[in-house]
Image (cartoon, rainbow, N blue to C red):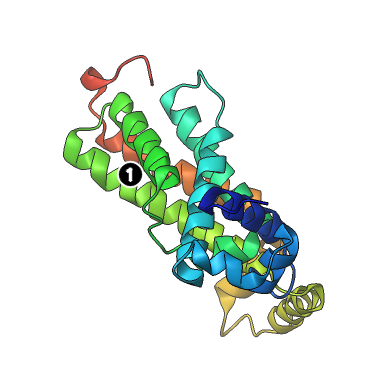
Amino acid sequence: MRLSPEVITDAAVRVAARAEADGLTGRALGEELGVDRSAVWRHFADRDALLLAVGDRLLRMAVAQVPEGLAARERLQSLARSVVEVYVAHPFVGAAVACRATRGPGEFAAVEMMLAGLQEIGLRAEAVARFQRMLADTVLAYAGMRAGYAVLPQHVKDGDEQARAATYAPLSPERYPALTAHVPYLAKQDGDRVLDALLEAFWLAVEATADPTRRNSGR
């Protein structure tokens, strides 16, 4: 097989999708490609460079999942959900790159989609930039958290859930009145509901700022 950065990144995405305990390693890549692990590092300066390349590929995948023809709000909501989905599906990489700038075509395409959508909605240039950063930081932080949770062994997840329920249930309502009053509802807040609430809060802020006279058909 003739190796190239693109071929290696393709293989790294496949390895990352397995969510195996050792994450993305030279050994795993060498086995996937059928080459000595040292061959990988002839095309990438180090593991961080490879990680950023794979992270950028995940962003390209998320952008590609957004259906064509959507209005601006629906387009950006689809992008947000796609980023979370792709990061969770490749959790070791998703958790590692959520706070990073990948500086590649995937990042550029995602930022372009966000800026264009916010501009269509009627925001002025300075507000477009501010709300793009707000959306990106919110979605990436949430995606990174979900990806980080996804890599935990199942017994750790089960133990955390059991411990949380056991810890909250006997708390004193006199000392923690709000917490004890809401215990029955806390467990019902799954990931989809939380992401929906984050996006709804974002759009309320956008619509309070947007100039209706500047909106075009993208709204």
For the C terminus, the quadrant is top left
Indicate the quadrant where residue 175 lies. bottom right
x and y percentages locating residue 67 in the rendered image = 57, 26
Q: Is residue 189 visible?
A: no
Q: Nearer the viewer, residue 69 or 24?
A: 24
- Residue visible at 70% across and 75% down in the picture: 22
x and y percentages locating residue 178 in the rendered image = 56, 71
Q: Nearer the viewer, residue 195 or 70?
A: 70
Q: Nearer the viewer, residue 41 or 25?
A: 41
Q: Amino acid at mark 1?
A: Gln
In the rendered view, tell whether residue 181 sits above or below residue 215: below
In the rendered view, tell whether residue 7 sits above or below residue 177: above
Total marks in image: 1
Q: Nearer the viewer, residue 45 or 119?
A: 45
The residue sitting at the front extreme is: 2
10 Å crowding of disc 1: few (<14), some (14-19), many (20+): many
Indicate the quadrant where residue 3 lies. bottom right
Label 1: element kind? helix
In the rendered view, tell whether residue 38 sits above or below residue 10: below
- Residue visible at 55% across and 41% down in the picture: 62
Instruction: Identify the residue under disc 1.
Output: 132
Q: Is residue 123 visible?
A: yes
- Residue visible at 70% across and 58% down in the picture: 33
The reply, left or right, for residue 132 in relation to residue 72 is: left
x and y percentages locating residue 190 in the rendered image = 68, 55
- Residue visible at 42% across and 41% down in the picture: 110
x and y percentages locating residue 19 in the rendered image = 72, 64
